[in-house]
Amino acid sequence: MPRRFLQQSTLPLGLLVLLAGCIDVPHPFSKPDKTAQQLAAQAPPARLDIPTPTTALLPEAGAQAWAKMVSEQLLQQTIPAMPQAVRKGDWWLQLRAEVRGDTVVPLYTIMTPKNTPRTTQEGTPVPAQAWSSGDPAMLNAVALDAAPRIAAALTGIQADDMEKDPHSLKHRPARVYFPGVVGAPGDGNISLAQAFTSFFRKTPDTLQNSADNADFTVKAHVTLTDGPAGTTGHPQQHIEIVWQVLDKTGKEAGAATQLHDIDAHSLDHFWGDVAVVAAQEAAAAVDQILDRYSGRGNAPLAEKSKTDSTPPTPPTPTTPQKQ
């Protein structure tokens, strides 16, 4: 029986795959990452500034704490947020609050570097008395509530911009350069590469023979080390196959790692079905990494969220922009 992948657990910008025994799992890559955690290299923002709000209905210390807590929670969502005055060329987040009845509603407006509002997200209403106190525990709960809303909005903005760009990966296949496999014993380098190429050609993306103009590069490396003797006294080896995906700048977009203990030297000559199974699931993993990293599968920002009936004003002199 060909060796199958046992389970998969997700990591930021990557995939971890564990192999063990003859256990059949038909869809080992079916569990998606949080879309809020996946921002492409070209997506906004490269950095998200969060100036201290001046219309937050909070004392100065509370306003500063709110900005700091929101940035901390966004960092947990892998959004590069900083509690600082707006810098030239940066996207930024305006925090403010409105009184509605006996509650206060936190508002979060994502602004472009040109001070154009892209969307406003509303937080969960807070009792007015509790809000005015500026209690740190309350503000932390508010920030915790806001972070996934803001991250999802950024994902939607990215998808919206890609939808409008005829050259984005939403409208064309990704160009992928695959230089082959290295480090495998026996015919592994050749059989893994041939099988991966065959399966990857069934995805929406295209393989090319040159790194020129490639959107991504896939590198595969096999490492074989001596393992334990095994319960029946047979010597074993530990095999690790890493399929690394790099973007056009050389930054890692993700990696699929395959691990397994095998009978010692059983792959010294021919890989056979092992290469087919490993390459098939690696091709699926790489395709999913490309989807997640590029953001091409994300839904554009909902139409009703694109405009704000009360556009925010640029930062006041108390939080000046650095030119």
Image: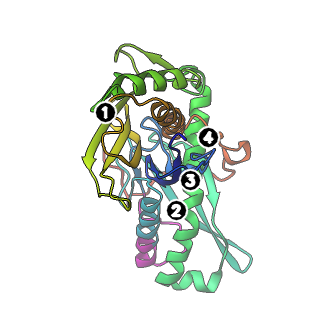
Magenta span = 50-65
Label 3 and label 2: CA atoms lie apart by: 24 Å
- Distance between the Cα atoms at labels 2 and 1? 61 Å
Measured along the vertical axis of the image, is residue 22 above or below residue 108?
above
Q: Please name the amino acid that badge 3 sits on.
A: Lys
Q: Nearer the viewer, mark 3 or mark 4?
A: 3
Q: Which one is in front in this view, the residue at disc 3 or the one at disc 2?
A: 3
Of mark 4 and mark 2, the one earlier in the sequence is 2
Residue 59 forms part of the magenta stretch: yes
Marks 3 and 4 sit apart, C-alpha to C-alpha, by 11 Å
Q: Main secondary structure of the magenta part?
A: loop
Q: Residue 9: x, y in percent?
A: 50, 55
Give the amino acid at mark 4.
Asn
Residue at numbered disc 2: 95
Toward which corner of the image does residue 217 lie, by quadrant? top left
Q: Which residue is mark 4?
A: 298
**Residue 240, horizontal then vertical, whole percent:** 34, 44
Residue indicated by mark 3 = 34
Q: Position of residue 72 (x, y in %)?
A: 41, 66
Real-space Cα separation, disc 3 to disc 1, in angstroms: 40 Å
Image depth: mark 4 or mark 2 in front: 4
> Who comes first in sequence, dot 4 or dot 1?
1
Q: Is residue 152 magenta?
A: no
144 relative to 260 in the view: left or right: right
